[in-house]
Amino acid sequence: MFFYDPTLLLIIPAIILATYAQVQIKSTYNKFSKVVSQRGYSGGQLARYILDDRRMREVTIESIPGELSDHYDPRSKTLRLSQGVINSNSIAALGIVAHEIGHAIQDEKSYAPLKIRNSIVPVANLGSGLAFPLFFVGLFAGMPIFMDIGILLFALAAVFSIVTLPVEFNASKLAIKILADGRYLTAKELPLAKQVLSAAALTYVAATTMAILNLVRLLILRGSRD
């Protein structure tokens, strides 16, 4: 039976890493969401100051519900910030704001990995939803073509995860530079913001590790049917 096949052992390290990453981002965010920045800017104020300073006035700012749901939408040029970030003057909030503005800067400069990631979003979403059902229908029904299509779709989803890594790392690098150059955070506060962004980056590393190991697992299962 599939549920007991030995290839499941492959993804155990990824599961452990993903669990650790989630614990890290939640604990780090909770810790530094209670540390108030000396400058006193709220997330919303900081976002507008930075965007105006960089003459990126076409980028709008919206408040959205949820926790850690912050993101930049390149289609509408909108910076969407969660209520816990846009109204907060904590180190965690300001680090997240600067990171998302990093994505806006990537979009403005046509950063290649971001363009690649955006171009494969629809296919990656389709692949992540259909890959496993198609593969295992093919596996149990003895239809290799379904297995091959499932592998192809999941490979595209894995590529999306891999391309996401340089996008996120670069956005965090830009964020720290923005906060330092504009003196929005003090020299003592910058390392704290880096901790928040590093914890967030670990979640993407975990997701990519999971995607790669799952792809290897599917390939092994496919090979066992030849």
Image (spheres, rainbow, N blue to C red):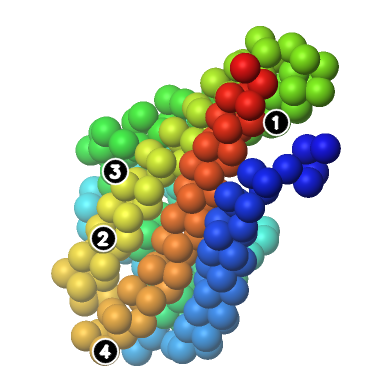
181 displayed left or right of 5: left
Q: Are marks 3 and 1 in contact (CB under 8 Å)?
A: no
Distance between mark 1 and mark 2 Cα atoms? 35 Å
171 and 159: which is toward the camera: 159
Instruction: Please identify, in this view, whether the residue under mark 3 or under mark 1 is nearer the observer.
Output: 1
Helix, strand or loop at disc 4? loop
The quadrant of the image that shows the C terminus is top right
Instruction: First in sequence, mark 2 or 3: give its number.
Output: 3
Callout 2 amino acid: Lys
Residue occupied by mark 3: 106
Distance between mark 4 and mark 1 Cα atoms? 47 Å
Instruction: First in sequence, mark 3 or 1: give its number.
Output: 3
Q: Residues within 10 Å of mark 4 (few under 14, many from 20)?
A: few
**Residue at (53%, 74%) from the top-left corner?**
24
Residue occupied by mark 2: 173
Instruction: First in sequence, mark 4 or 3: give its number.
Output: 3
Callout 4 amino acid: Lys
Residue occupied by mark 4: 188
Helix, strand or loop at disc 2? helix
Distance between mark 2 and mark 4 Cα atoms? 17 Å
**Residue at (38%, 68%) from the top-left corner?**
198
Residue occupied by mark 1: 132
Q: Residues within 10 Å of mark 1 (few under 14, many from 20)?
A: many
39 relative to 15, above or below: below
**Residue at (82%, 17%) from the top-left corner?**
141
Helix, strand or loop at disc 1? helix
195 relative to 216, above or below: below
